[in-house]
Structure formats: structure tokens, C-alpha cells
Amino acid sequence: MSGVEEIRERLTNGFSINRIPQKTRDEFIRFSEDEFCGDRGMALRHLWDFYTGLLSSNLAHIEAELAELRSDVDSLKTQPVKVEEKVIKLMSGRELRT
């Protein structure tokens, strides 16, 4: 991008972020065009809402659930496995064990 284009983009968008890897920038622009009709502000807002909503506030709840699941799995691992043996007695008196 030339210097003139960069200045024009800064003036029209009102927001500038520097030092973004080219691949990340291209992916973000493609994401904003596909999902938000090119509205980069709304795309940024969507990503920020996802970050602040899912990753920060619900993270403690998810970690608590995960800890509970881990303790359940650990308790199941320590329990001995009970194998029930089924015995079928035939009329001949012979027993079949399954």
C-alpha cells in the first residue's frame, strides 16, 4: 500500500492500527467483508464482544465445570470395575457362565 493510500484510509476510517502482520490484516479485511459487508468497525466490535464476553466472564464458570468433570473422572478411575458373572443353569445340571 502506498503512502497516499494509507493516509486516505486513515482519514476515511478514523482509526489506525500499525504493525499488523500482512496475513492477519488480509484475513481481518476478508472477514469484515464477508461477515459485515466491509464494516471493519463492526467486525472489530464483534471480535471484542466475543473476547470480553466469552473469554473473560464465562471462563471462570467453564473452569469450575471442568474441575468438577475432572474430579468425577478421577473418582471413576479409582473405583474397581465390577464384572458380573451371569450363571445359567441347564436342566442337565450343567452351569454356563457368561
Image (tube, rainbow, N blue to C red):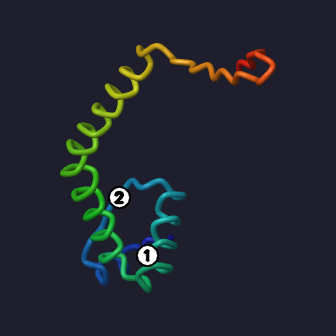
Q: Residue at x 63, y 23 (%)?
A: 86
Q: For this rendering, which residue is in front, 88 or 74?
A: 88
Left or right, 82 with reference to 87: left
Q: Is residue 65 above or below residue 47?
A: above
Q: What's the residue type where badge 2 is placed?
A: Asn
Q: Which residue is mark 2?
A: 18
Residue 2 position, x and y percent, is 49, 72
How many other residues sit within 10 Å of disc 1, few (<14), some (14-19) or many (≥20)?
some
Q: For this rendering, which residue is in front, 18 or 35?
A: 35
- Confirm or deny contact between disc 1 and disc 2 (CB under 8 A): no
Picture quarter with the C terminus: top right
Quadrant of the rendered image containing residue 97: top right
Q: Residue at x 48, y 53 (%)?
A: 21
Q: Which residue is mark 1?
A: 32
Q: Nearer the viewer, mark 1 or mark 2?
A: 1
Dot 1 or dot 2, earlier in sequence: 2
Residue 49 position, x and y percent, is 25, 65
Secondary structure of residue under mark 1: helix
- Checking the image for residue 70, the label placed there is none
Q: Is residue 28 above or below residue 90?
A: below
Q: Is residue 33 above or below residue 49?
A: below
Residue 88 position, x and y percent, is 69, 24
Q: Residue at x 76, y 23 (%)?
A: 90
Residue 14 position, x and y percent, is 25, 77
- Residue lying at the far right of the rendered structure: 92
Q: Is residue 60 above or below residue 76?
A: below
Q: Residue at x 28, y 50 (%)?
A: 55
